[in-house]
Structure formats: C-alpha cells, structure tokens
Image: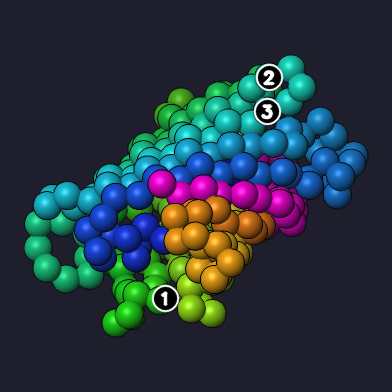
C-alpha cells in the first residue's frame, strides 16, 4: 500500500493556501518481482487535500488500488498540525487505516512533535516528526514512529523532488512476522508542465515517478524497490 505524504504542503502551508491533487500511478512491482508480488494491483489513485487555518493545518489522502475486478484495497490517513504559537514546532495528531481483499489494516493513532524548516524562498525544506504510535488489536500495541519529509523545487519550478521516510516499530508475529522494525520511503520526481512556456499556467499536470523503497513492509520479508509511472493534476 502506497503511503503518500505530499511534501509540497510544507511550501503551501507557508503561504496559507489550500491545495488538492489527484494522482494516478502505474505500479511496476508485479513485473519486477513476478514470484513475490504476482497479482499486485497495477493501478493506484490518490486524492490529497491540505488546508491551513489559524489553529494549524489539516492534511489527508485516500489511496485506492485497482485490479480488473475493481477496487482491491483502500487506505487513508488524516493528520492535524496544531500550532497556537510562532516557531518551527507544532503538535502532530494522526490516524491511519484501511482494508483490502487480502487483509485489513490495523487502526493506528499517532501523536508527537513536528519540526519544520523552509528556506527563505521556499524552494526547499524538510520536516521531522517523532511520534508515539498505538496500533490497535495487535500483540504489542504500544510503538513509535519517526517520519522525515523533504521537498526541493528546482529549474525555475519545472522540476520537483519530494519524499518521505518512515521508520516504525510493529511488534506482532502476524502483521509483522519478519522483525520489529519497518522502514518505508517513497521519493517522488515530478516535471511540472505549467512551468514550461509551451503550456498555459493553469495546465496543472505533472508527469513523474515514485519509487517505493521498503524493508519488512506489508508482510513482505526483506528489501524491495518498486517504481511507478505517474500523473498528477493539482487543483
């Protein structure tokens, strides 16, 4: 399951704007790992929304995976940054959950501090969150998660490099039989067509890729690198 945390929200939040986008990913995992990932859904759509307000900001996304028979999995995350003060620190509260034709995803509740940095022209930045993570109805529900995010806009906004990295503990012999720690990172590279002279400024289509790099993720044993081919339309 793809976990997309759109890092450009760091930039958007600085300007107090709202943003939404829809993404379509063609997943190459089935082709690259024919034995291990045979039958893995090839298409995933993602809907994201970010909206700041005077008390912080709200972000959510919904992923849906598709096979020829229809929707095979659905997953969503919603996060709230609370900030009643000036400075780079905010209080982070988050929920994760979903279901699929194979297995249900446990309800996860997270909270902790977030540190955010943007440079003066908002062309690059990062955030770091250290969170307590409660995973409902597993053998040992009390865990932790560290999340780092980054963004880099370059070539006069024509290209964007964004991503996140998660490291968390999940101690359960059924949901994570290969070890207590799970690592997941999903760097993305986008070419933003509306920044080229040949396209209208309102043509908000981006072409790009995402690479899922993981270890012991999704009940898989070991290290995997799974790229996608992707389209994104921003509203």
Q: Which badge, 2 or 1, comes first in the chain's sequence?
A: 2
> What kind of element bears circle 3?
strand
As displayed, is residue 127 above or below residue 220?
below
Q: Check if mark 2's residue and mark 3's residue have beta carbons within 8 Å.
A: yes
In the rendered image, the residue lying farthest to the bottom is: 120
Stretch in magenta: 210-235
Q: Marks 3 and 1, how far apart in space? A: 34 Å
Instruction: From the top left corner, tell me how far across and down residue 223 is, in percent.
Output: 74, 55
Q: Is residue 164 magenta?
A: no
Front-lying residue, 67 or 79: 67
Mark sitting on residue 66? 3
> What kind of element bears circle 2?
strand
For disc 2, the marked residue is: 70
Give the class, few, some or many, for how many residues have Cα within 10 Å of label 1's Cα (few <14, many ≥20).
many
For disc 1, the marked residue is: 124
As displayed, is residue 101 above or below residue 120?
above
As displayed, is residue 66 above or below residue 70?
below
The answer to whether residue 180 is left or right of residue 228 is: left
Secondary structure mostly taken by the magenta-highlighted segment of the chain: strand
């Amino acid at each position: 399951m793809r976990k997309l945390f759109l890092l450009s929200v760091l930039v958007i939040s600085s300007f107090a704007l709202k943003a939404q986008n829809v993404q379509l990913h063609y997943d190459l995992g089935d082709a690259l790992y024919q034995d291990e990932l045979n039958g893995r859904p090839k298409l995933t759509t993602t809907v994201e929304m970010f909206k700041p307000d005077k008390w912080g900001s709200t972000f959510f996304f919904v992923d849906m995976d598709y096979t020829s028979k229809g929707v095979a999995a659905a997953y969503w995350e919603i996060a709230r940054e609370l900030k009643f003060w000036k400075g780079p620190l905010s209080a982070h509260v988050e929920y994760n959950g979903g279901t699929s034709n194979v297995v249900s995803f446990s309800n996860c509740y997270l909270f902790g501090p977030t540190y955010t940095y943007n440079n003066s022209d908002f062309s690059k930045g990062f955030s770091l969150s250290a969170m307590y993570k409660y995973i409902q109805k597993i053998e040992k529900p009390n865990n932790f998660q560290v999340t780092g995010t980054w963004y880099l806009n370059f070539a006069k906004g024509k290209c964007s490099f964004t991503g996140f990295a998660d490291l968390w503990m999940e101690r359960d012999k059924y949901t994570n039989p290969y070890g207590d720690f799970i690592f997941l990172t999903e760097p993305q590279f986008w070419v933003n067509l509306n920044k080229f002279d040949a396209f209208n400024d309102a043509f908000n289509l981006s072409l790009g890729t995402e690479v899922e790099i993981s270890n012991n993720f999704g009940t898989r044993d070991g290290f995997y690198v799974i790229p996608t081919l992707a389209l994104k339309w921003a509203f």
